[in-house]
Image (cartoon, rainbow, N blue to C red):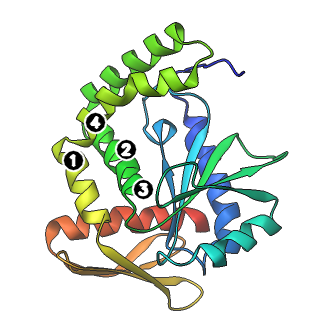
Amino acid sequence: MKKIVVLESSPVWQREFQRLCVHLTSFLQDDCLAIRHVGSTAVPGLAAKPVLDIDIVMSTAHDLDKVRPILEKRGYYFRGDLGIKGRYAFGYGSSSFMRHHLYVVKPQAGSYLDHLALREGLKADPSAIERYAIVKRALAKQFIFDIDAYIEGKSEVIQAIMSSSAGRKAQMLNGQVHKKTCLNDNLILLETNGDFLGEILFTKHPFEIVKIKGCDEVKEHLISFAKEISLGYQ
């Protein structure tokens, strides 16, 4: 049984995610929508267990059979949904990368949108970061080896953060249907369809916006999403 350890935020976590993102993008870029850093290590300034949480977002809800063998060829193994609908976990043996939890998620899955609601809710509110960190530190001391109790103890504060205006906005915008098209070696078109129409044409590296359409909040969302995609090409 592993001891629960919550550490102060480190810039190493962002660098390690980018390193792993580049690796995953090298063989998944044509077979997924995005590779996104979620969980506490994705929020600068937030204390966390030193484990990356990564969502590989499928292009459509039916692409697991396409993505799974690609990951298995690179040393990952399928663990199923672990009881969470729309999210599929993958484990690994030895790795040169920082310890991480890897998930393949359906693009409109509730679990995926919850990840983003929590991340964006925290980023928008420094007081929420501190409040959440206090809870996590206290739970780690109280339940040193009980991960289930640790997770359950966080649920109330997590729900409050996800229900914030920034959290709800993240769920709403990311819950739209997105389409990514690689037009050539350095140009990507990202489109969103549904209640919030928009598109962004951008260069992979260095990141640069070539064209963007949509209302202000859609543009803001598309720029942020495009920057996340471009991390895999650094």
Q: Which residue is drawn at 49% across and 73% down?
A: 33
Residue 127 image position (x, y, % from top left): 25, 25
Whether tag 2 and tag 1 are in contact, CB under 8 A, the answer is no
Q: Which of marks 4 and 2 is in front?
A: 4
Q: Residue at x 58, y 18 (%)?
A: 146
Disc assigned to residue 159:
4
Structural crowding at the residue carrying mark 2, measured as other residues with C-alpha within 10 Å and reported as few (<14), some (14–19) or many (≥20): many
Q: On the rendered structure, is 65 left or right of 150?
A: right
Q: Which of marks 1 and 3 is in front?
A: 3
User: Which is more N-terminal, label 4 or label 3?
Assistant: 3
Tell me the quarter of the image containing the N terminus.
Answer: top right
Residue 157 image position (x, y, % from top left): 30, 27
Inspect the image, locate mark 3, and give the three-letter code of the amino acid beneath it: Tyr
Residue 16 image position (x, y, % from top left): 64, 45
Q: Name the residue under label 1.
A: 166
Q: Mark 3 points at which residue?
A: 112
Judging from the image, what secondary structure is the residue with disc 3 in?
Answer: helix
Q: Which of 98 and 19 is in front in this view?
A: 98
- Compute the Cα span from label 1 to label 3: 16 Å
Q: On the rendered structure, is 102 left or right of 75?
A: left
Residue 155 higher or lower than 28, as above or below: above
Q: Nearer the viewer, residue 48 or 115?
A: 115
- Compute the Cα span from label 3 to label 4: 14 Å
Q: Mark 2 points at which residue?
A: 119
